[in-house]
Image (cartoon, rainbow, N blue to C red):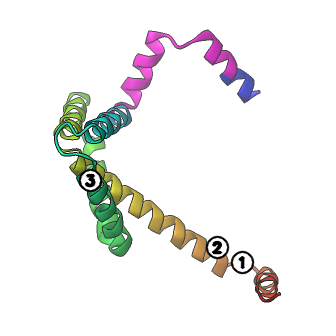
Amino acid sequence: MAKNKFVEKLKEGVSVQEIEGFASKHTTEVFCVLALVIGAISSAFDFFTGPKLTILFFTLGTLAAIFFPTPTEKGLKKLYSFVYKQEKMTEILLGVVKIVIAIFVPFIYFGLFGLLAGTSYHYYVRHAQIMVENAPRSMKRRDDEEEHD
């Protein structure tokens, strides 16, 4: 049913009011996506800094978050809780600042995304380790036997 509803919505199209409602409800996410796309274009086409620094900063951000997960997570929580506490106009202004940064110094913006990626990587790897440790003994034994065959 949900798939048919989605297909019907695609066929009908999206009204301007629906787009405005979505953008109003998810302002930070919309600006984040716009800044990401604009930053990728700016970096890929060498407008100001080029892709080398962008890839480097993304990698450094990811590594920093993997090796220092707790301080990185605390910093990101502070940043995003600050952003979400703002009034709508301030939130829009912060979104415009993101876009400007993405145009002129995209490596800074991608460094932040590297921190998010590293934090996410660390979280899911740790979660998988906990799931394996908490698995019933019978499951662990079967896995060990399969490895030795």
Within-10-Å neighbours for mark 3: few <14, some 14–19, many 20+: few
Measured along the vertical axis of the image, is residue 117 above or below residue 101?
below
- Numbered disc 2: secondary structure: helix
Residue 16 percent coordinates (x, y): 44, 11
Which quadrant does the C terminus fall into? bottom right
- Numbered disc 1: secondary structure: loop
Chief secondary structure of the magenta span? helix
Q: CA distance from mark 3 to mark 1?
A: 43 Å
Residue 21 falls left or right of residue 6:
left
Q: CA distance from mark 1 to mark 2?
A: 6 Å
Measured along the vertical axis of the image, is residue 143 above or below residue 93?
below
Q: Is residue 22 found inside the magenta-colored segment of the image?
A: yes
Residue at 64% in and 81% down? 133
Q: Are marks 1 and 2 in contact (CB under 8 Å)?
A: yes
Residue 22 falls left or right of residue 48:
right
Query: Which amino acid type is marked by label 1?
Result: Ala
User: Mark on residue 52?
Assistant: 3
Q: Is residue 14 found inside the magenta-colored segment of the image?
A: yes
Residue at 33% in and 36% down? 28
Numbered range of the magenta stretch: 7-27
Query: Which amino acid type is marked by label 3?
Result: Lys
Q: Which residue is mark 2?
A: 131
> Foreground residue, 128 or 21?
128
Residue 33 percent coordinates (x, y): 37, 36
Residue 120, by quadrant, is bottom left
Q: Which residue is mark 1?
A: 135
Q: CA distance from mark 3 to mark 2?
A: 37 Å
Q: Are marks 3 and 1 in contact (CB under 8 Å)?
A: no
- Numbered disc 3: secondary structure: helix
Residue 22 percent coordinates (x, y): 44, 24
Query: Which amino acid type is marked by label 2?
Result: Met
Residue 34, by quadrant, is top left
